[in-house]
Amino acid sequence: MANHRFVFQENQYTGGCLPCTSTEFDRLVDDPDVAWKISMRQAVEAAVNGGRPLQQFVLHPRFQDYCKREEAKGEAGEKFRQLTDGQKLLRWVSCLKSSLPCLVFAVSAFEAVPRLGKDGQPVLDASGQPVLYQRRTLEGIRQLSGLFMFDADHLPMDPHEVFLRTQVSGFPWQVGLCHKTSSGHGLRLVCEARPELGNIADNQIELARELQLLGVTGTTGKPVVDDSCIDASRISYCPCRKDIFSVNYQVLFNS
């Protein structure tokens, strides 16, 4: 498919991976609901952590609906009712984050497997053939994209400051995408891998060194570099347009 280099999922819980064209990418990052979820997460976390009034969030219809669903979960619902408003709100925005569309930058294709129904049997199409979908698993990777993802979490500096380090003359990676993460305190880079350096992990280590982040401790007391991104099948939650510092369509889509 034209402009298809990596895949995406509408969310991480349902559906398979689909080709992410430049058109699909634009649709996702410009989706008002994506922007709303990210803004709400940042606003709630800032209010809770800053000890500010929470009433405007507690009264939000979508939060009220979330609470009703959680409270209806039997024993788990009873435990949920005992939480403070702040704790409930933090759980809510964590769910909002988890429901964002997911991009899988390092993979062009996963193995197509039969979709199963609630009875555990394959779902059949109108002609009686199994309905196939690309299930996101590490062992199911069929084609890598040549891109790799780099995350720096809980940065002790403004993420934009780190982005500027990628803009210096002679920066040794082609950057396809650079954006602030949904927390507002992290940075994600998607770059063309350099085979001469080795695998994804090798590229990440050298990129961290180039960005002066190797060994840097974040605001949580842990290293800012997220080494879980060495998993090529790992998802990247979709950013909203306003949080994107740079995007290079030629690198992302070979266009």
Image (cartoon, grey):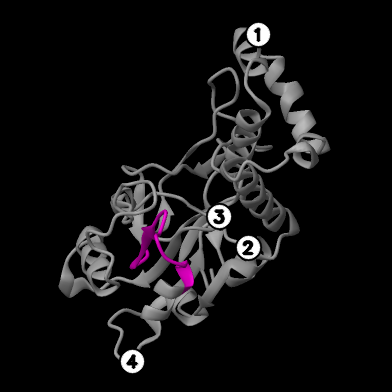
- Label 3 Cα crowd, 10 Å radius (few <14 / some 14-19 / many 20+): many
Q: Is residue 15 visible?
A: no
Q: CA distance from mark 4 to mark 3?
A: 28 Å
Of callouts 3 and 2, the N-terminal one: 3
Q: Amino acid at mark 3?
A: Ser
Q: Which residue is mark 3?
A: 182
Which residue, as the protein is rendered here, is positioned at the far front? 51
Of callouts 1 and 2, the N-terminal one: 1
Q: CA distance from mark 1 to mark 4?
A: 59 Å
Q: Position of residue 142 (x, y in %)?
A: 35, 53
Q: Which residue is mark 4?
A: 169
Q: CA distance from mark 3 to mark 2?
A: 9 Å
Q: Is residue 182 visible?
A: yes
Judging from the image, what secondary structure is the residue with disc 1 in?
Answer: helix
Which residue is located at x 37 percent, y 79 percent? 166
Judging from the image, what secondary structure is the residue with disc 3 in?
Answer: loop
Of callouts 3 and 1, the N-terminal one: 1
Q: Amino acid at mark 1?
A: Gly
Q: CA distance from mark 3 to mark 1?
A: 31 Å
Magenta span of residues: 145-160
Q: Amino acid at mark 4?
A: Ser
39 in relation to 131, above or below = below
Of callouts 2 and 4, the N-terminal one: 4
- Nearest to viewer (mark 3 / mark 2): 3
Label number found at residue 74: 1
Judging from the image, what secondary structure is the residue with disc 2 in?
Answer: loop
Q: Amino acid at mark 2?
A: Cys
Of callouts 1 and 4, the N-terminal one: 1
Label number found at residue 240: 2
